[in-house]
Image: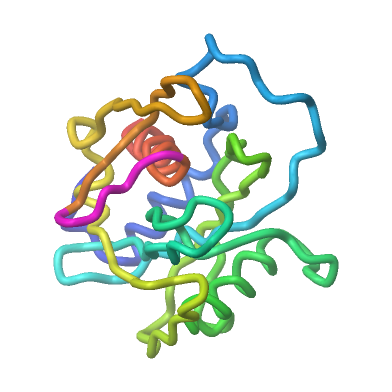
Amino acid sequence: MDLSDTPKDWQGEIRTALLAEGLGSSDFDLNGHLPRPQQQPLRQAGVLVGFTDGAMGPEILLTKRASSLRHHPGQIAFPGGSKDPEDASLEACALREAHEEIGLPPENVSVIGRLPVHETVTGFAMTPVVGWLKGDFEPRLQPQEVTELFRVPLRHLIEPRHYRIEGRRWRGARRQYYAVPWGPYYIWGATARILRGMADRLAR
């Protein structure tokens, strides 16, 4: 992909990539040898893969989750969360959560599509909603949920060589996962897996 494209061209490339057929992903992709937990209905969640214009091309917004959270404390994540009954759609869920977590007004986001659903080991069916930010906004972090907001250049995230497979023990077993570090930020797990899937689509 040509990184000198204008933002409008980038949006076109991303829209085309989102239309490509493909299966969803899962925290179990690299851990097929491990037993899955007892079958239970997955909880629906929407997260925002938010693109914004940067000096060197598009960037993606990411957050660092508060260490006090029950699920994935202290990890790098997309803004987002569980779908509430009043959410009309998963897009509405992702935009509401982004507004609550980082102060991003929903009207500042142009939704351009979805990435395939990602199943987490904690029992969520996570739908990545892709949107392009229209102009700047003043971040307002919800400290009980988010401790930091930062941006990562897309040029870093679409390079397969920046991804690696690592492992750690969790709940009595060693599990493998994708990681794509950026500066001081250790991006791993579900977030890295979704980003890797997006990179594969953009590389087609």
Based on the picture, tell me whether residue 52 belongs to the magenta stretch: no
Residue 91 drawn at (x, y percent): 66, 63
Residue placed furthest toward the right: 85
Residue at x 47%, y 20% (from the top left corner): 173
61 on left or right of 58 = right
Which quarter of the figure has residue 10?
Answer: bottom left
Q: Main secondary structure of the magenta part?
A: loop
Residue 54 drawn at (x, y percent): 22, 70
32 on left or right of 50 = right
- Quarter holding the N terminus is top left
Based on the picture, tell me whether residue 188 belongs to the magenta stretch: yes
Residue at x 55%, y 30% (from the top left corner): 26
Residue placed furthest toward the front: 172
72 on left or right of 182 = right
The residue stretch that appears in magenta:
183-189
The foreground one among 55 and 60 is 60
Which quarter of the figure has residue 76?
Answer: bottom left
User: Residue 188, relative to residue 31: is it above or below?
Assistant: below
Residue at x 15%, y 55% (from the top left corner): 183
